[in-house]
Amino acid sequence: MASATKNTRKARPLSPHLFIYKPYPTMVMSIVHRMTGAALYFGTILVAWWLVAAASGEAYYDWVNAIFGSFLGRLVLLGYTWALMHHMVGGIRHLIWDTGNGLAKETADKFAYATVIASVVLTILVWVVGFMAR
């Protein structure tokens, strides 16, 4: 009886993990969507910090703006903008899927590539409009 149990355990399949599967566009976009959601959480803390600085007085507001206006600050804000645009476009993609459309593999892959392209284009557009408004 003990040997039968031992053989049964050896015959069990291994649990699948990410390294077994070849990455495909919708899988990668799912992972990136979750990552941008987490990034937005921390980026929103920066927005709240900026709003608190605006309410705290001119000196503190200028100091926070100097941080956000530095090269590193602008790089973080650019990343936050991209994460926001990517997460938004990914959400729209999921809304389309919720209607039952675009679920075919080829269409879903096209949506995945379109999500990346649209998020980059929208990020550039937001930054161009932001600099033109200054």
Image (cartoon, grey):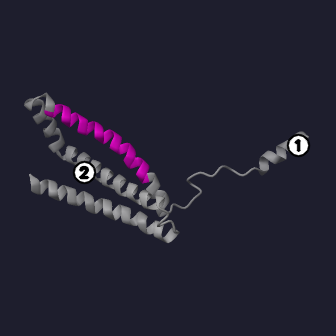
Bin the neighbour count of mark 1 within 10 Å (Cα to Cα): few under 14, some 14-19, many 20 and up. Answer: few
Task: Answer whether labels 2 and 1 touch (C-beta < 8 Å).
Answer: no
Q: Give the range drawn in magenta.
A: 32-54
Residue 85 vs residue 4, the one in the foreground: 85
**Left or right of 62 on screen, residue 22:** right
Is 37 magenta? The answer is: yes
**Left or right of 7 on screen, residue 112:** left
Residue type marked 1: Ser
Residue 132 position by quadrant? bottom left
Bin the neighbour count of mark 2 within 10 Å (Cα to Cα): few under 14, some 14-19, many 20 and up. Answer: some
Secondary structure mainly formed by the magenta segment:
helix
Query: Looking at the rendered structure, which numbered label has been put on residue 58?
Result: none
Query: Compared to 34, does 45 lie above or below?
Result: above
Residue type marked 2: Leu
Is 34 magenta? The answer is: yes
Residue picked out by circle 2 = 78
**Left or right of 107 on screen, residue 76:** left
Residue 126 vs residue 1, the one in the foreground: 126
The location of residue 89, given as percent across then percent down, is 35, 58
Residue at 46 percent across and 52 percent down: it is: 31
Element type at mark 1: helix
The location of residue 66, given as percent across then percent down, is 13, 39
Residue at 42 percent across and 65 percent down: it is: 111
Residue picked out by circle 1 = 3
Residue at 14 percent across and 34 percent down: it is: 54
